[in-house]
Image (tube, grey):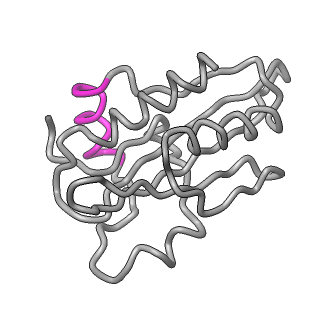
Amino acid sequence: VPPIHNISTDVNDPPAFERIVALRGEGSNPLEYDAARLGPLQAQAYPWVQPLDSDLAPADAVRRARGVLEDMGLEIVGVEEDRGLLEATDTTFWFGFKDDVVVRIRAQEDGSGSRVDVRSVSRVGTSDLGVNARRIGEFLTAFANP
């Protein structure tokens, strides 16, 4: 597992956190995504972490994404349906570590549905031991298979 704690389905334009920024605390890991460094490491370790194309209209995809996040037990921090942006926090059971998740949903260019991007970032630690990638995988699987 590579020593990274910031995973995104879109390494060139990762979904940005907004509301969660104020909750992260002074000692939290930075939110900047260094695509030149992290992209190749992530691609090698987690090649399946990719955007998800859906037949759902963006508003319907936002509602499904919210349900998936809630079913996963994440605390919803914000939902902006009109912008296709959802933010949530996951707190680990054993040590109470917090990881932040943002889901971005955009209409596909051809109008055939939506594109779903997910990013998960640990607040502390250099390596997440694969937790963020697994969380994204769990989200994508649940979203695609309601």
How many marks are shown on the rendered structure? 0
- Residue nearest the observer in this picture, 17 or 135: 135
Q: Residue at x 31, y 45 (%)?
A: 36
Q: Position of residue 49 (x, y in %)?
A: 40, 27
Q: Does residue 106 belong to the magenta stretch?
A: no
Q: Does residue 44 belong to the magenta stretch?
A: yes
Q: In which quarter of the image is residue 25?
A: bottom left
Q: Residue at x 50, y 47 (%)?
A: 14
Q: Residue at x 30, y 54 (%)?
A: 92
In what quadrant of the picture does the C terminus appear? Answer: top right
SS assignment for the magenta stretch, majority = helix
In what quadrant of the picture does the N terminus appear? Answer: top left
Q: Position of residue 73 (x, y in %)?
A: 49, 46
Magenta part of the chain: 35-46
Q: Where is residue 98 in the image (x, y as percent from the top left)?
A: 35, 61
- Residue nearest the observer in this picture, 36 or 52: 52
- Residue nearest the observer in this picture, 78 or 119: 78
Whether residue 126 is situated above or below residue 53 in the rendered picture: below
Q: Where is residue 87 in the image (x, y as percent from the top left)?
A: 58, 56
Q: Residue at x 22, y 27 (%)?
A: 45
**Residue 97 appears left or right of 83:** left
